Image (tube, rainbow, N blue to C red):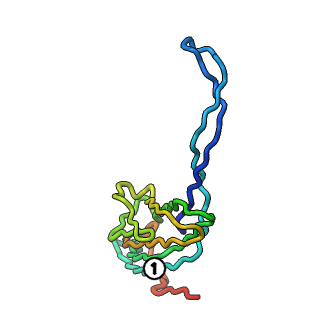
């Protein structure tokens, strides 16, 4: 799943609010100006993902477990759809909220994510992108895991799998 990216558009709105007296009763109506930030999706222009999967079947008693290792590296290119420079925010969500991720790297046009305490909520990074220009997000990590559960026999397995276009 690709990361979510959006540009932030700031605008001013006027709201009508009730004004109350010290007794808590309505004393009149007034107008208040508020700053609002709208999130507008930034188009994903290109994706290049390299994934290396390593299957390791292990037997424990009579049951077989499929363990795996994965090395993930990807670049995603997003475009600012507006005719002026805007803040671009990208949120990368991990495939598993409970997974362990080693050698994690994330940078948006060279801006790295600040210290990440809770990977289960994903990682957010921001930069400013000129009008109509593109920003490149680079992501890399390694992880290990266990398939959903044991199988009763080794059975037929696929050791190599490749997709190319």
Look at 52% across and 62% down and name the residue there: 88
Look at 65% across and 38% down and name the residue there: 14
Vertical order, 28 against 70 (above or below): above
Residue 49 x %, y %: 49, 78
Quadrant including the C terminus? bottom right
Quadrant including the N terminus? bottom right
Q: Secondary structure at mark 1?
A: strand
**Left or right of 149 in this view: 46:** right
Q: Is residue 99 visible?
A: yes
**Left or right of 75 in this view: 67:** left
**Left or right of 41 in this view: 121:** left
Residue behind mark 1: 51
Q: Is residue 64 visible?
A: no
Residue 93 x %, y %: 48, 62
Q: Nearer the viewer, residue 160 or 136?
A: 136
Instruction: Count residues near mark 1 (Cα–Cα under 10 Å), then give few for <14, some for 14-19, many for 20+.
Output: some
Look at 58% across and 39% down and name the residue there: 34
How many numbered marks, from 0 up? 1
Residue 142 x %, y %: 37, 73
Q: Nearer the viewer, residue 101 or 155?
A: 101
Look at 59% across and 65% down and name the residue there: 42
Most extreme residue toward the top, as rendered?
23
Residue 114 x %, y %: 36, 59
Q: Quadrant of residue 130?
A: bottom right
Q: Quadrant of residue 147?
A: bottom left
């Amino acid at each position: 799943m690709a990361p979510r990216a959006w540009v932030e558009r700031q605008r001013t709105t006027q709201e009508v609010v009730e004004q109350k007296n010290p007794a808590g009763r309505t004393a009149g109506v007034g107008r208040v100006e508020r700053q609002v930030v709208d999130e507008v999706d930034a188009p994903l222009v290109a994706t290049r993902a390299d994934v290396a999967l390593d299957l390791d079947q292990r037997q424990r008693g009579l049951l077989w477990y499929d363990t795996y290792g994965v090395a993930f590296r990807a670049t995603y290119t997003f475009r600012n759809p507006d005719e002026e420079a805007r803040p671009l925010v990208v949120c990368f969500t991990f495939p598993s909220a409970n997974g362990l991720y080693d050698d994690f790297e994330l940078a948006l046009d060279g801006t790295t994510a600040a210290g990440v305490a809770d990977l289960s909520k994903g990682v957010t990074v921001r930069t400013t992108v000129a009008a109509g220009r593109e920003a490149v997000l680079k992501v890399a990590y390694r992880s290990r895991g266990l398939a959903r559960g044991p199988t009763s026999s080794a059975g037929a397995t696929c050791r190599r799998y490749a997709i190319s276009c």
